[in-house]
Amino acid sequence: MITLNNLSVHFGGRHLFDDISMMIGTKDKIGLIGRNGTGKSTLLKIIARIDEPSSGSINTPNDFKIGYLPQEIEVNSELTVFEETETALTEIQYLEKELDSLNNYISESTDYDSNEYLRAIEKLTHYTERLKILGAESKDGDIEKVLLGLGFLRSDFTRKVREFSGGWQMRIELAKILLSQPNCILLDEPTNHLDIESVRWLENFLKNYYGIIILVSHDRRFLDNVTNRTLEISLGKIYDMNCNYSEFIKKRAEQRELQTAAYKNQQKQIEQTEKFIERFRSKATLASRVQSRVKQLEKIERIELEDVDSSSINLKFPEPPRSARLQVEMDKLSKSYGSLMVLDSINFALERGEKIAFVGRNGEGKSTLSRIIAGLESYDGEMKIADTLIIGYYAQHQSTLFNPDLSVFDVIDSEASGEVRPYIRSILGAFMFSGDSVYKKIKVLSGGEKSRLSLARLMLRPANLLILDEPTNHLDMAAKDVLKKALMEFTGSLIVVSHDREFLEGLTNKTLEFKNNKIKEFLGDIDYYLEKTQIENLQELEIKDRHNTNESSDKSSKSQNDRDLRKSLQRELNKSEKEHSKIEMEIELMEAEISRLDELFSDSDFYKNALELSQKQERYKLLKDELEVKYQLWDDLSNKILDLKEELRA
């Protein structure tokens, strides 16, 4: 259980939230919602003990473990995907190391009656039992299950973490949290970097998870499928209901309607009473009635209308400069990262005024091609860019673009020039940065605020080609609608990478599908593309693509997959046989000690020392109990080894 006591957070005189108190139960799965910048990510960080509140406290039980996944991460690991994920199992790794040390000591020891030897045996038993409880025997299988569920292929397990994009590295961090089995999982926009297949797997995992879940998401379906409680942060207050997102929105709307109706009725009553008092105040014959109405007015408990956050961004892109008809032309362009081919001999042309959607599974090269066109990635092959082309680029990962120690104003001020400079404040105001908020440091901004700042930066220089990579990831619903409207009114060219069908509908006039290192053009918007591919939505496309790609990959590289599987089985077999031998040795040592005690008990002189007799009898009973456990472990491993050998023979 988590208890929030009078929690307040203030930034530069502004209250994110003030004097919040609540209890979070062990079975609560909470959706934390609210407009961008209202404090959702801040509250998660406070619960995770990363940030401190301005006042108040958070109480949790002893040994309460929290797993926290932020919106953005920076990973510099040289480990493989499997090795990096395994680092989450710290207790298992520690215990396995200690067991190796204990086994070495026991095997070399000859003083079986010493206190050190007896303590080592006790520790060995305790650690072995603890590892069994933690599921150490199946840890490799658990790691594999989670990684596969989050979209990795078995062939990815041995690749270096640094070879993967930020979205895939985020999945690795998520896998580590899920495997560590904390009492509470805090997730900040976890679906931003997942395809629908992985989202569904995560939904099922979280629905069945035994601990507390608190998640921030703008994915309505995900919230509905996972949560049973909703908290909304709005204008410094928190609204709390025991229901999922859709039910919460419905109930909040009903509450506001009832509140507004009650307010209007009360205002009408007050107005009539005040008119009566004013009209008949001077009439002596009605003095008692007037006084009665005055007292009645004083006793009325005034209904106050709830403040509603109606703030919104005001976005209109600058008129694009005139450019050549053919803006971008590629001929047999390729891109690879080491041995990993991402784009293979593609041909592509962009003409003035075209608005193109890049669609396809994660990792198929959509963001890579966007960066190549923006001049941020090297490539092989040919690409011609028109001399008159001016590109405005919005990156998917905002944290890499800004100096975290700069303020919002500094970012815009450093890039504004010429006739734009006098309008810096106006531009920031249009994106909901006003007053002291323009001096907030980048490092304290929410994901949505960084997204708004990146959009504001696009306004500083007129562009005739906008390239937007997942622009809606951190935006709330209202901000998404404003962005879409502004892009539809933009008369320049547009390339947008997105999985959001609703956002893409009616926005683009050409669709590029990325699949198997190639691209395929569809001369229509997203609905035309979906109709042509006979798929109802982009999410189903992701499922079909992954299914077909896996089938194709399985057929073309069956022997490689078989080898990988056999290697995995062989590793598991070797490990099990090693553990089996270790337990056999422990059983032999324990049986030898029991045999020595049996000899002692057969000597009548031994019973003369009552204290020693009692100690040995206690030790004898403990050994017998532990031996039963060892026999069971030995038997389980024997069966497991037989099964593994059978699989290897198949």
Image (tube, helix red, strand yellow):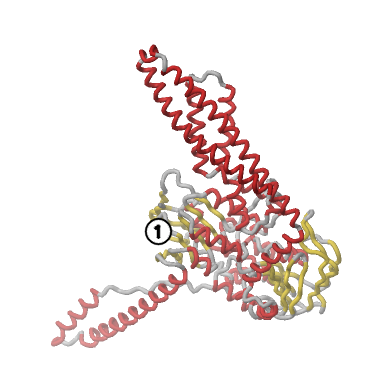
Q: Residue furthest top?
A: 605
Instruction: Please state which of residues 460 and 172 is positioned toward the viewer in this rendering.
Output: 172
Residue 145 makes an appearance in the image: yes
Instruction: Please state which of residues 205 and 320 is positioned toward the viewer in this rendering.
Output: 205
**Residue 421: x percent and y percent?**
67, 69
**Residue 159: x percent and y percent?**
71, 50
**Residue 303: x percent and y percent?**
32, 74
Q: Is residue 100 left or right of residue 554?
A: left
Q: Quadrant of residue 239?
A: bottom left
Q: Which residue is mark 1?
A: 20
Amino acid type of the residue tagged 1 in the rendering? Ile
Q: Residue at x 30, y 80 (%)?
A: 266
In the displayed structure, 201 sits above or below 276; it is above
**Residue 192: x percent and y percent?**
60, 63
Q: Is residue 284 left or right of residue 643?
A: left
Instruction: Please state which of residues 120 and 594 is positioned toward the viewer in this rendering.
Output: 594
Label 1 crowd bin: few (<14), some (14–19), many (20+), radius 10 Å:
some
Q: Residue at x 75, y 70 (%)?
A: 391
Q: Quadrant of residue 429?
A: bottom right
In the displayed structure, 92 sits above or below 501; it is above
Residue 170 makes an appearance in the image: no
How many numbered marks are there?
A: 1
Instruction: Please state which of residues 635 and 188 is positioned toward the viewer in this rendering.
Output: 635
Q: Residue at x 43, y 74 (%)?
A: 250
What secondary structure is marked by label 1?
strand
